[in-house]
Image (cartoon, helix red, strand yellow):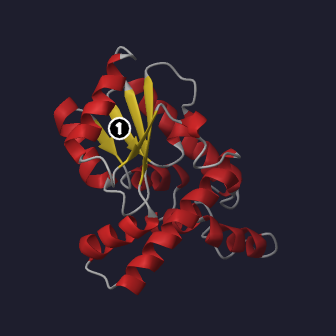
Amino acid sequence: MAVITITGEKGTGSRQLISQLAEKLDYDFIGEDFQHEIARELKLSEGEVEMFKKASQSRLIRKMDRFTCTLVQKVVDRERGCLDDRDFYEATVKLVEKLHADDNVIIHNWGAQCILNGKPNTVHVRLTRTREKKIEEAMKAFDLNFSAARKVVVDDEQDLEAYIKQFFGAELNDARLYDLVIDTGKTDSARAIGMIVDQLKHTGG
């Protein structure tokens, strides 16, 4: 019984690896579907949650919203006012902690490695790959040319780095946040899954 957090950008093969790991362990997998829960908690559309999650865009939102409170839709409950960092952060923490209490789940991104840092029965995994290999993977996965794939990869790297720094005051690549750091460009899925399962045994999961 444990929770696994997996942090990995586009091009690291994280989705395929997580799907295989979840099947092997019979764990639930929470990734981008987590937006459904955030949206429901804040009474927002999923598009608004996705926009706010991108730190580069949320800075603009906050700058405009400070004066007009119109760029982001107001929360239905008027007592809550407008969406801001605190709303988003508190909703994310609340839902990740609920998942931790429920156990047997894999959480992809969302800063879960920060929220659950030091919590019992957790394994934190960082998936990494060189930018060149991430671009190659993105070209195949999304049927893109090199230029378009590079933009997808670089934007995703920057968004995730900014998100972790903005909401958790941490550095994405700080090894202290993780129990395992796996280079998926050098380690195939089967071996990576074996490494995670072995680490999981040490947690009692």
* Residue 74 sits in quarter: bottom right
Residue bearing mark 1: 106
Q: Residue at x 24, y 47 (%)?
A: 188
Residue 191 lies in quadrant: top left
Could you say where residue 101 lies in the image, as x and y percent from the top left?
A: 44, 24
| 62 to 40, vertically: above or below | below
Counting from the top left corner in percent of width and height, residue 49 is at 52, 62
For image coordinates 63% across by 47% down, the residue present is: 89
The answer to whether residue 102 is left or right of residue 47 is: left
Say which amino acid is labelled 1: Ile
**Neighbour tally class for label 1: few under 14, some 14-19, many 20 plus, Cα within 10 Å:** many
State the quadrant of the N terminus: top left
Q: Which residue is at a point 29% across and 40% down the rendered structure image?
A: 192
Reply above or below: 141 against 80. Answer: below
Residue lying at the far top in this picture: please name it. Answer: 204
- Classify 45 as above or below 139: above
Quadrant for the C terminus in the image: top left
- Residue lying furthest front in this view? 186
Front-most of residues 186 and 87: 186
The residue sitting at the right extreme is 67
Tell me if I can see residue 80 in this picture: no
Residue 171 position, x and y percent, is 64, 48
* Helix, strand or loop for disc 1: strand
Residue 175 left/right relative to 40: right
* Residue drawn where x is 36% and y is 57% of the image: 12
